[in-house]
Amino acid sequence: MAGVNVEALLVAWLKVDAAVDAVVDGRVSTELPSDPTYPLVTLRGITSAEAVRRRVDDHRVQVDCWAPPPPAAASLARTVRGAMESLEGVLVDRGFVSEVRTEIGPRWLPDVVPGVP
């Protein structure tokens, strides 16, 4: 998907997914707001490689689900993963999503800032 903004694609996809939106009410972005309302989802592209010969780009995205308490964050993570998996096989603006996979499953990463879920 050369030239596709994967972050923008995923933000848009997750915002219109009914199951995700029922939990986060549109709070999906690439940055944590300075005064966040929880629950919310942030994501960031962490690696990408444009294919030359295979014509298939490879993108990796880190997705963070923010919700107190930890079981709510875990539930949100499962919901988001399901929404992202439903993107597999979909034609998008400049390409086709051929595969969606989880490389590191949901895990609890406690914040070091007191009071932030």
Image (tube, rainbow, N blue to C red):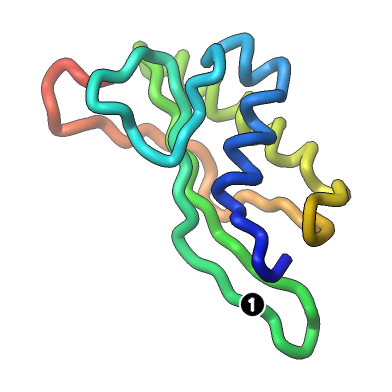
108 or 34, which is in the foreground? 34
Pointer 1 residue: 50
Tell which of 50 and 60 is nearer to you: 50
Q: Position of residue 20 (x, y in %)?
A: 63, 20
In the rendered view, would you say 47 is above or below 26? below
Determine the image quadrant of residue 14: top right
Residue at the location (70% across, 24% down)? 16
Please tell me whether residue 30 is drawn above or below residue 34 in the rendered image: below
Q: Is residue 41 above or below residue 117?
A: below
* Residue at 37 percent of width and 33 percent of height: 108
- Residue toward you, 5 or 52: 5
Q: Is residue 54 left or right of residue 84?
A: right
- Which residue type carries mark 1? Glu
**Pointer 1: residues within 10 angstroms few (<14), some, or many (20+)?**
some
Indicate the quadrant containing the N terminus: top left, top right, bottom left or bottom right: bottom right
User: Residue 96: x and y, percent?
Assistant: 83, 58
Quadrant into which the C terminus falls? top left
Quarter of the image for residue 112 reads top left
Q: Where residue 72 sits: x, y (%)?
A: 46, 14
Q: Is residue 112 above or below residue 74?
A: below
Element at badge 1? loop
